[in-house]
């Protein structure tokens, strides 16, 4: 049986944004909020984005969740980041006592979605959410970018050209996942990718040889 955690789309993906938007507008979610369950309305989340237009700290996140009545420990916050359920810090700001992590402004919205998805959403709602998602379509480029953590097709290809491959940026795996239902098109994309790799390395080897065969003084003249 598929676990809820296995079905949860990545926090940076189109799928997550789509499901979150649909959830916030659903009658079941609105009824949960009206009954007093500690979740944010769409309007409240929009107000938080205005209140924190750039980034937000953990203290601010904790304060806003506490006001809503949502119990969310820092250990859970860290666990969700580690498991890539919510976004990590965008950067660190220097303070008098050291440094402070700054998180994307949509972090509270992401926490709200994950908490509702895990704690409240029943099987019927989850099925309905994913049925709505299956009716949507995006370009193969966007779909592949959503498979890689950098969210950049160019960066993923550059790593491939360098011979670097790890799970979060594996362009070959992303292509297989996205184009698994069209083997002919997948073969064409892989062929072009391999040609880029071969051409790059062939030209680099020639360029490197050119430099190796050219002597320069040990010390440059002033």
Image (cartoon, grey):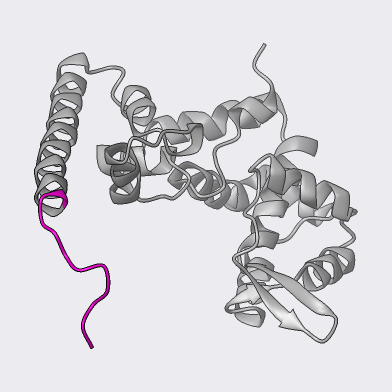
Q: Nearer the viewer, residue 180 or 208?
A: 208
Q: Is residue 36 left or right of residue 108?
A: right
Q: Quadrant of the C terminus?
A: bottom left
Identify whether 97 is placed above or below 199: below
156 or 12, which lies in front? Answer: 156
Please give left or right for residue 132 compared with residue 123 in the image: left
- What range is drawn magenta here? 212-222
Estimate the x, y position of residue 199 in percent, counting from the top left: 10, 37
Q: Residue at x 22, y 18 (%)?
A: 182
Overall secondary structure of the magenta section: loop
Question: Which residue is drawn at the image coordinates 49% and 31% (left, top)?
Answer: 167
Q: Name the residue rendered at 63%, 74% in the picture.
A: 55
Where is 175 relative to 119, above or below? above
Rendering coords of residue 42 (x, y %): 63, 62
Drawn side of residue 50 relative to residue 75, left or right: left
Q: Is residue 120 visible?
A: no
- Which one is in front, 158 or 191? 158
The residue located at (68%, 27%) in the rendering is 4
């Amino acid at each position: 049986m598929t676990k809820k955690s296995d079905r949860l789309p990545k926090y940076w993906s189109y799928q997550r944004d789509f499901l979150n938007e649909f959830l916030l507008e659903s009658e079941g979610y609105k009824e949960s909020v009206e009954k007093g369950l500690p979740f944010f309305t769409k309007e409240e989340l929009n107000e938080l984005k205005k209140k924190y237009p750039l980034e937000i700290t953990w203290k601010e996140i904790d304060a806003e969740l506490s006001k809503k009545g949502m119990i969310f420990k820092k250990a859970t916050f860290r666990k969700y980041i580690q498991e890539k359920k919510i976004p990590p810090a965008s950067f660190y700001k220097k303070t008098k006592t050291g440094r402070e992590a700054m998180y994307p402004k949509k972090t509270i919205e992401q926490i709200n979605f994950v908490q509702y998805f895990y704690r409240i959403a029943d099987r019927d709602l989850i099925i309905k959410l994913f049925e709505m998602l299956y009716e949507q379509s995006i370009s193969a480029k966007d779909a592949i970018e959503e498979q890689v953590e950098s969210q950049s097709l160019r960066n993923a290809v550059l790593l491939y050209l360098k011979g670097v491959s790890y799970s979060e940026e594996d362009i070959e795996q992303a292509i297989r996942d996205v184009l698994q239902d069209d083997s002919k098109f997948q073969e064409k994309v892989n062929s072009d990718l391999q040609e880029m790799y071969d051409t790059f390395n062939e030209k680099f080897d020639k360029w490197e040889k050119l430099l190796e065969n050219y002597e320069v003084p040990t010390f440059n003249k002033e």
